[in-house]
Amino acid sequence: MLNLGETFPNFTASSTLGDLDFYEYLGNDWGVVFSHPADFTPVCTTELGRMAQLAKEFAARNVKTICLSIDTVGDHHGWVEDVKKVSGCQVPFPLVADTNGEISEKVGMLDKSVDKKVTVRAVFVLGPDKVVKAVICYPASTGRNFDEILRLIDSLQLTAARPDVVTPVDWKVGGDLIVKPGCEIAGCTSVELPSGKNYLRYVKQ
């Protein structure tokens, strides 16, 4: 699987929104690439429905989403009707048909524990430079938490704009930030630690 700091490769493929050039689709926005094991399966249906419900949240963060599996475009088109029924929302993002598994193989999204080609529940968060900023991988048995993925994107975008801070455990927008070691910010608050080392310093967002 691609690692942090590696460039996600460009590809062209058929999708529910027509023929798609991945880099052209992303433009200068952030991107999130999701893979799912198969169409017409229960967990995936709930996931795609949740993604559709959160489409405005991703758009507000200048993030373009794209989903991928080894199913055909025809299957994708049939499946999105089920997703619409479950979620009450249209699916506004493209579902890519990687029928030969070429894209999935290249970026490491195939499940090696099964004989046939099945994509895992992978999540790649990409910056506008097409570089991988975060990777999450779930087994087929576990649905993803999209609120956490949005939280992750909020942290990535904030720290990209402010390289002098990092976000603490369970951080949410508006919460205190941690001053990155080696950086100085006026008005920060230091935590006195038994070690005597001054490495834990907080600052208001």
Image (cartoon, rainbow, N blue to C red):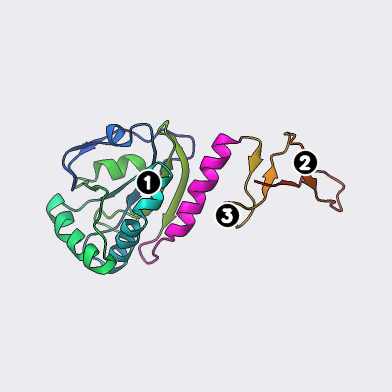
Can you give x and y, in whole percent of width and height, for residue 153 in the image? Answer: 48, 47
Q: Is residue 144 magenta?
A: yes
Q: Say which residue appears at 60% left-offset and 58% top-offset.
A: 170
Q: Say which residue appears at 73% left-offset and 34% top-offset.
A: 182
Q: Are marks 1 and 3 in contact (CB under 8 Å)?
A: no
Label 3 sits on a secondary structure element that is: loop
Residue highlighted by disc 1: 59
Res 125 → quadrant: top left
Lower position in the chain sequence, tag 1 or tag 2: 1
- Inter-mark Cα distance, 1 to 3: 18 Å
Q: Is the residue 162 above or below the residue 135 in the image?
A: above
Task: Sort mark 1 into few (<14), some (14-19) or many (20+) by Cα contacts within 10 Å.
Answer: few
| Dominant secondary structure of the residues highlighted in magenta in the image | helix
Left or right: residue 137 versus residue 96 is: right
Task: Sort mark 2 into few (<14), some (14-19) or many (20+) by Cα contacts within 10 Å.
Answer: few
Is 16 in front, or is 69?
16
Q: Which residues are magenta?
A: 139-162
Q: Is the residue 21 above or below the residue 177 in the image?
A: above
Residue highlighted by disc 2: 187
Can you give x and y, in whole percent of width and height, for residue 94 in the image? Answer: 24, 47
Q: Say which residue appears at 32% left-offset and 52% top-offset.
A: 35
Residue type, label 3 = Lys
Residue type, label 1 = Ala
Can you give x and y, in whole percent of width and height, for residue 205 in the image? Answer: 64, 46
Residue 172 image label:
3
Residue type, label 2 = Gly
Q: Say which residue appears at 24% left-offset and 56% top-offset.
A: 116
Q: Nearer the viewer, mark 3 or mark 2?
A: 2
- Inter-mark Cα distance, 3 to 2: 21 Å
